[in-house]
Amino acid sequence: MVHQPASSSRGNKSARIVFVGDVMLGRLVSQELHRRPAEGFWGDVRPLLQDVDAVIANLECAITTSKEPWSRTPKVFHFGADPRAIDVLRAGNVRAVSLANNHVLDFETAGLLQTIDLLEKAGIAHAGAGHTETEALAPAILDIGGLKLALLAVTDNEPAFAARADQPGTAYVDLDYRREAISTIETGVIASREAGADLLVLSCHLGPNMVLRPPTPIREFRHAAVAKGIDLVQGHSAHVTQGVERDGRSLILHDTGDFLDDYAVDPVLHNDWSFVFLVEVEAASLRRLTLIPVRLGFAEVRLALPHESREICARMTKLSAELGTGLVPSPDGLSLDLSPS
């Protein structure tokens, strides 16, 4: 867990925070680390990322020199990035990452522990994995624009990756045991409040791949987390963006999709369509969400062209409307007023 230095504007407790989905810097992306500068992976999106107080992402790989792949249980894909990947995160203004996913132990315990060490040396906060279960479940506390933000992270993927009292791993929850899963969130909320957090964020890697709508148990879990005190839920795991939903004064980004990877593109579900999810916070309350459409290429991301933007925004508008959320067209893409009514 990394505690970031406070901003000079601490008094107003306001910030502009970007949430992006899966950032996978391993496999073929890792090979590109030796061929292009760190800034090049973010394309023309980078100025936007640099202009906010912080970017929060799901790190969908280990960052490690370890060559021993996970073999304790069957696994098809192993994503490991060269340590130069840390420079890519820095270049994208990534100040915090979730490690609660199904790839952070792809190169065994050694890969996870090196990932944690590299992140901490770079001053990048992390949540959702650790040396012990207690550490994996603990919130990461960041001071962003005068706002104290607590980041919690959990996953229901790869139960064999789960941290134990004496075993490094991920913050694993089993949604078949909902009471225990919600209790885990409640404990994290209490710890976050005791740490003085103004805004509580839950990053969760839940459910199946390539589905445009959150399964009912996952949607219910996210609402239950809000009921326990979570202000913003950032979902990821589906590899496609899902709708946005309000719950009182809280916000649920059901799936923030992919953002940087080498994945094959599904021509129907379009895992190469995504957004920069920009959240504006004032007086420690959510005020506005702006969705800026992007298009993913091989090991890079760029702002969507006008005709692409129309398609990407149309799908998100439809999916969000199904959840009772009316997104409004804006010069940047789509927006949602989150001010108290």
Image (cartoon, rainbow, N blue to C red):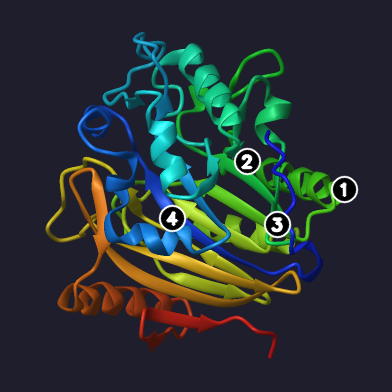
Numbered disc in front, either 2 or 3? 3
Q: Earlier in the sequence, mark 2 or mark 1?
A: 2
Q: Nearer the viewer, residue 55 or 211?
A: 55
Q: Say what secondary structure mark 2 lies in.
A: loop
Mark 2 sits on what residue? 177
Q: Amino acid at mark 3?
A: Leu
* Residue at 41%, 72% in the rendered image: 291
Mark 4 sits on what residue? 20
Cα gap from disc 2 to disc 4, whole angstroms: 29 Å
Q: Amino acid at mark 1?
A: Glu
Please give left or right for residue 205 compared with residue 333 in the image: right
* Residue at 36%, 64% in the rendered image: 275
Mark 4 vs 3: CB contact within 8 A: no
Cα gap from disc 1 to disc 4, whole angstroms: 27 Å
Few, some or many C-alpha atoms within 10 Å of disc 4 (few <14, some 14-19, many ≥20)?
many
Mark 3 sits on what residue? 200
Numbered disc in front, either 2 or 4? 4
Cα gap from disc 1 to disc 3, whole angstroms: 12 Å
Q: Earlier in the sequence, mark 4 or mark 3?
A: 4
Mark 2 vs 1: CB contact within 8 A: no
Q: Is residue 282 above or below residue 7?
A: below
Q: Is residue 181 above or below residue 1?
A: below
Q: Say what secondary structure mark 4 lies in.
A: strand
Q: Say what secondary structure mark 3 lies in.
A: strand
Mark 2 vs 3: CB contact within 8 A: no
Q: Is residue 213 visible?
A: no
Q: Position of residue 7 (x, y in %)?
A: 72, 56
Cα gap from disc 2 to disc 3, whole angstroms: 23 Å
Q: Nearer the viewer, residue 248 or 282?
A: 282
Q: Amino acid at mark 4?
A: Val
